Amino acid sequence: MYEVVSGLLEVFSAMFQGYCLQYFFGSFLESRIRNRRTGGLAAAVLYGGLRLGMGYYLPKGYTSFWVFARLAVILCIVSMIALVFYRVVGKITLFLIVTFMAVGEMSVFLAHIFFELACHLFRLWGWRLENGYISPLEFYNRVINIITIGNQILFHVIGAALLYFTMRKIVRDYREKDYAIYRTELLFILTPGLTGLMVCTLLRITIDTAENGVPETLYDRYPSLMVIMPVILLLLLLSIVFGVKLFQDMICWNREKSSRIILEKQVSSLQEHMGEMERVYSGIRGDEA
């Protein structure tokens, strides 16, 4: 039962990520396929299929090599989807690719931390069994199965919700989608995403450790990280969102500033012209007198 539910949740997670990808890219880039719904569905299904295939064929190791190999494969998948289904436009495409990958990784880690917290329910039920508060072993096993499946569902739902609402927030805040972005501006909105992506890569490398040959997670060795890491990841996630909002506000402010400068120049020119006319008129009146 657990294997079936876990497999279905993996399929749901991959396909939902594909949906978020086509929604995010489709909000900025022009589709190569005339029917946007068909193109979006094809992009979502292809991405989901490739992610499932990557999970099946790529070893789930946490060594540096396999972590960076996994990151490179995801980069290739996302870039290929962008090139095949959308008309890639300049620097903005780099921002879209890096931001989607970073938000996806951070969403998974935030969901994983909540999953680790929920796993403490196992210890609670084990303590109750050891102390005789739960007598039927069959009832204990049934509760454990329910908690295990519930944790898996919660893990995928939290990750999907964080990814979707973050993508939606960025799309809504990025109002000037036709604005020609410059290199410095690109670095400004790209840096938070790259930072988040590197932090998640570091976590993947260091999350699993071993003490005297006994495997353990980083949270077991340093329990305070259960609080510190969610705060860091949430701050990085917010830095991406508010970085985009600040960038768009700067564009609007610069546009208003340029308009005000032009208006001031026009008013100044008009005042000079009126002053010249007044002097000419005064000269004519002096000649008549």
Image (cartoon, rainbow, N blue to C red):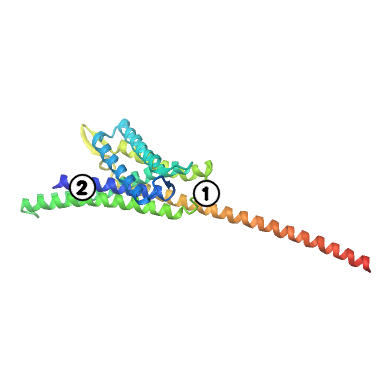
Q: Is residue 172 above or below residue 13?
A: below
Say left or right for 100 vs 256. Answer: left
- Quarter of image, res 266: bottom right
Question: How far apart are the two marked residues, 2 and 1, measured between alpha carbons?
Answer: 41 Å
- Residue at the spot 52% in from the left edge and 54% down from the top edge: 249
Q: Where is residue 268 drawn, in percent x and y?
A: 73, 58
Quickly name the residue at label 1. 179
Q: Where is residue 58 drawn, in percent x and y?
A: 26, 34
Tag of residue 8: 2
Q: Is residue 63 above or below residue 234?
A: above
Say left or right for 248 vs 65. Answer: right
Q: Where is residue 45 drawn, in percent x and y?
A: 29, 45
Q: Quadrant of the C terminus?
A: bottom right
Q: Decide if residue 18 is in sight here.
A: yes
Q: Where is residue 104 drawn, in percent x and y?
A: 34, 45
Type of residue at label 1?
Answer: Tyr
Tag of residue 156: none
- Residue at the spot 78% in from the left edge and 60% down from the top edge: 273
Q: Decide if residue 112 is in sight here.
A: no
Q: Is residue 271 above or below residue 122?
A: below
Q: Secondary structure at mark 2?
A: helix
Q: Residues within 10 Å of mark 1 (few under 14, many from 20)?
A: few
Type of residue at label 2?
Answer: Leu
Q: Secondary structure at mark 1?
A: loop
